[in-house]
Image (cartoon, helix red, strand yellow):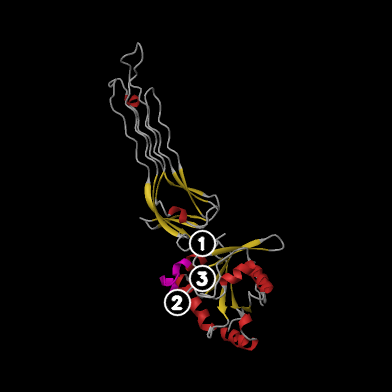
Amino acid sequence: MYNDVTMSKFTDTIKIYIEAGKGGPGCVSFLREKYIPKGGPDGGDGGKGGDLYIEANSSYTDLSHFFKDRIYGAENGKPGMGKKMHGKDGRDLILKVPPGTQVINEEMNELICDLFETEKRVLLCVGGIGGKGNLFFKSSTNQVPRYAQPGLSGEKGILTLNLKLIADVGLVGLPNAGKSTLLSVITNAVPRIAAYPFTTLIPNLGVVSNDDGSSYKIADIPGIIKGAHQGHGLGLSFLRHIERVKVILFLIDSTEEDPEYNLQLLKAELRSYNENLLNKPYYILMTKTDLIDSVELGKKITQLKDQTVLSISSINGENIHILLNIINKLLENDIVSP
């Protein structure tokens, strides 16, 4: 679960350099034992370099564990030794990331994999082959080879890791629209809440548990502002994480003067970033209804010119049970009405 941590700790995109292990060098050696002062070549091969993998692991919630060290390499193979002994293979390295992480080849700008499933593991770089020892080169025409192969370098590259939250429902709203308060009321999340804009500086993820044992995840994303699709405000930090949700809830502060403008602004920013976002099932929530009289609220709901509107108050619980029922039906792809 994403809880209250500072903006500096939460990381949802990062560039790293990776390299598989280099193969160990072959050994130049000759048998030297009692009574065999001038034995033949007995140099063993070098060990293979370690491979480098990436794996989705639910123990991680963001990419901040990569922040201090952006260069990652698997272990090199060990050198070959005398007496025909092969070097030990290098240990593989497994980079662990939260589910929902996309791995992009920075140089080719190509998606390598999308680690949507927990424990999914993908091979990124193959370790280099170990070099042959001088024993390998012994022949009828070369009885005492005095050379061996170096190990081959492992594969390497530059990656961009992008985390996109995996949630069923996304809360979309301007700063201070009541997203964090709603999340704290209906889920087990503990987001930071205060009466000023941009209280939420990182994504928060909560789980709603139904009476029948089923559950779903709700993502509270930092508030959007005009120009968010161009990176203004918290911009892409919001929009990236809304792409995977199945249902969108637009939260509109009922105390604002022009709720219709706010709704259209939110939709415009989503459309500018990815027009497919507006094809998702949605509902409009008029929040903070405990702060406005019913007549004024009715006028503002009428201004929205949309049938999928529900007025709620996270403070006194107004219509929260109806909202939960609506969410369940939206996730079942049913048509609902308040």
Question: What is the three-letter code of the residue carrying label 2?
Answer: Lys
Residue 19 part of the magenta-drawn span: no
Q: Earlier along the polypeptide chain: callout 2 or callout 1?
A: 1
The residue range painted magenta reads: 226-237
Question: What is the three-letter code of the residue carrying label 1?
Answer: Val
Q: Which residue is mark 3?
A: 199
Question: Residue 226: which disc?
Answer: 2
Question: Residue 5: which disc?
Answer: 1
Residue 137 relative to residue 93: left or right: left
Numbered disc in front, either 2 or 1: 1
Question: Residue 254: which disc?
Answer: none
Q: What secondary structure is marked by label 1?
A: loop
Q: Earlier along the polypeptide chain: callout 3 or callout 2?
A: 3
- Marks 3 & 2, CB-CB < 8 Å contact: no
Q: Earlier along the polypeptide chain: callout 1 or callout 3?
A: 1
Q: Is disc 2 surrounded by few (<14), some (14 to 19) or many (20+) residues within 10 Å?
A: some
Query: In the displayed structure, would residue 323 be above or below residue 121?
Result: below
Q: Identify the image quadrant of the N terminus.
A: bottom right
The spot of residue 265 in percent (x, y) is 49, 79
- Marks 2 & 1, CB-CB < 8 Å contact: no
Tell me which corner region of the image, top left, top right, bottom left or bottom right, holds residue 204: bottom right
Q: CA distance from mark 1 to mark 3?
A: 12 Å
Q: What secondary structure is marked by label 3?
A: loop
